Amino acid sequence: MPLSLDKLCIHTITTKPWDLETAARKYGAAGVKGMSIWLDAARGFRGGMAEAGRMVRQEGLDIVSYVRGGFFTALEGADRQKAMGENKKIIDEAAELGAPLIVLVVGATPGQSLFESRKQVTEGLAAVLPHAEAAGVKLGIEPLHPMYADSRSAVSTLGQANAICDALDHPNLGITLDVFHVWWDDQLETGIKNAGEKGRIFSFHICDWKDQPDDMLNDRGLMGEGVIDIAQIRRWVRAAGFSGFEEVEIFSNRYWAMDQDEFLEKIKDEYLNLP
Ligand code: ZN
């Protein structure tokens, strides 16, 4: 359905071999319209956050999100406090950068239940949301595939993310939906509808899940290369009122080893080929 690149955003991690400046120049020249910036890429830019933001916008790119905050869970209260402080710092960086949204990988801690971890996530969010609101930055909970529920995210489904959003009911809190993490969920359509009704779908990530990946983290596929019905999920997301950027986020040893200019062309082709 996409006839143009107007909604195409790429995450800096997707072209990890490029530094921020190179990525911005290359994306801009290729006609890509949005960029989501990872912490390492932004912090590696010498001129500071505000200057990094200016540089990216000068290439004709909207900054879609800053990736990523979260990791609110820990066995010790002192460590949870530290995480809240770290998130406030990330919120300040996003504001300086001019990024309207921070993507959150909320955290999970071995040695405590996922219920306890989700409670800590809710507490952590409650503690930082006023800071986010004052800074004019939104926070998007990204449910992660349950294979990451050991130590990355106690939130595995859109239903769980919706429940936390319901509990906190804050306009700066919503959801980042990534097809890689949620495609298997038989409640996905309902979850998207519920999130949409409350104006909570803040961002949308696309890539593919390869049949038999070589690596559970760094072998994501390009759109069309795997088993996810991306077109269906996108129809649901659009029907729920989301009309923002479609963000290509791919961690792949295979693609990082490739010539990145050729990879960028492949991303554009596959994006335009999406039914
Ligand atoms: Zn994602």
Image (cartoon, rainbow, N blue to C red):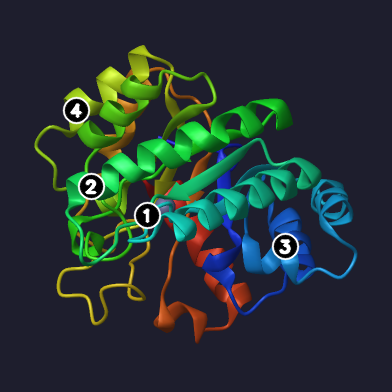
Secondary structure at numbered mark 3: helix
Distance (Cα) linking label 4 and label 1: 29 Å
Left or right: where 126 falls relative to 24: left
Residue 213 screen position, x and y as percent: 22, 75
Whether residues under marks 1 and 2 lie with C-beta atoms below 8 angstroms apart, the answer is yes
In the picture, the disc for residue 116 is 2
Taking depth in this image into account, of 76 and 243 the one nearest to the observer is 76
Q: Badge 1, how many Cα within 10 Å: few under 14, some, many 20+?
A: many
In the picture, the disc for residue 42 is 3
Query: Disc 2 or 3, which lies upstream in sequence?
Result: 3
Query: Disc 1 or 2, which lies upstream in sequence?
Result: 1
Distance (Cα) linking label 1 and label 2: 9 Å
Distance (Cα) linking label 4 and label 3: 34 Å
Query: Disc 1 or 3, which lies upstream in sequence?
Result: 3
Residue identified by numbered label 1 = 73
Query: Disc 2 or 4, which lies upstream in sequence?
Result: 2
Secondary structure at numbered mark 4: helix
Whether residues under marks 4 and 1 lie with C-beta atoms below 8 angstroms apart, the answer is no
Q: Amino acid at mark 4?
A: Glu
Residue identified by numbered label 4 = 189
